[in-house]
Amino acid sequence: MAGSALLAGAQTTPDDSSSHSPSLKSESDAGDTSLPPVDLKSLPRNLFVDQKNFWLSPFHMTESDLHWVVPAAFVGAAFLASDTAIEGHVPANPSTASHAVTASNAGAVALVGAGAAMFLWGHVTDDDQQRETGLLSGEAGIDAFLDAEVLKYAFGRERPFTGSGKGHFFSGGTSFPSEHAAASWAIASVIAHEYPGPLTELLAYGVAGGVSAARVIGHQHFATDALVGSAMGWYIGRQVFRTHSHYSDADIARYGTFRKSDEEDAAHQAGNMGSGFAIRPHG
């Protein structure tokens, strides 16, 4: 519990902590009350909205989206062409592969556990943002798992240890994209967006990146499978955060509006400018 509290932390500045009672949340900490509440009752509806948005997103891309989608497509194509060459440089020792698979499972479980701990700790300490972070990270993980599962069976790519080892598509395989990578990066993305800060991002994305790398080292996926899964997971986490979070004003002001107006972003941005790795005191 203490580790997840450190990973999350509050967004208060030194001035806030000196001018308000430590047992009370400031008005900005209360979040955006114009959005529906984030709770377990809203999870099924939110998942439906997330899935609709994800599968319809290609039809609603903006010019700013194309600025990263197009380069990402070229990078993915380059990795796809190099998959077998990269696989040839992955250690073939069975013990190394087994340890890598174990590490990838442990990393994914650790991220799921961190989200669950934040949800529970937020309830115990009456910290609404930690509670929201835990719930949204779980929602994003479920979204990423569902989307990756559909794509895996749609593309049918062979895994590195099956068939000819060339990773042929539409051959009944389940390699593309990596579910472990997608779910891990989705959870990490929510945590990092809720609490932007170098240390939080390093911890969250570091674990997620380790999961992705371990899936390749463990010969469970080709490099492209892990790369696409990671990118998809990060995107899903960001969209879940920006669609449902009550604390997304600073992020929207930085990356562009998604649901809220620019005027609201400017009005609330100051309340979210503190360190992403401070602990909110409670009475």
Image (cartoon, rainbow, N blue to C red):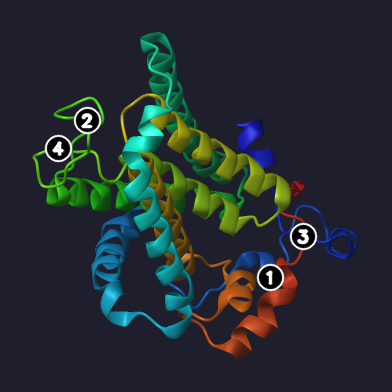
Quarter of the image where the N terminus is located: top right
Whichever of labels 4 and 3 marks the residue nearer the N terminus, that label is 3
User: In whole angstroms, how far apart are the C-alphas of marks 4 and 2?
Assistant: 11 Å
Left or right of residue 50, residue 275 in this image: right
Residue 173's label in the rendered image is 4
CA gap between label 3 and label 2 equals: 52 Å
Foreground label between 4 and 3: 4
Q: At which x and y percent is residue 52?
A: 24, 69
> Between disc 2 and disc 1, whose residue precedes?
1
Check disc 2 and report the residue beneath it: 165
Q: Secondary structure at mark 3?
A: loop
Task: Mark 1 and mark 4 in contact? Answer it, CB < 8 Å.
Answer: no
Nearer to the camera, 130 or 167 = 167
Give whichever of 99, 24 is nearer the camera: 99
Q: Amino acid at mark 2?
A: Gly
Q: Amino acid at mark 4?
A: Gly
Q: Nearer the viewer, mark 1 or mark 4?
A: 4
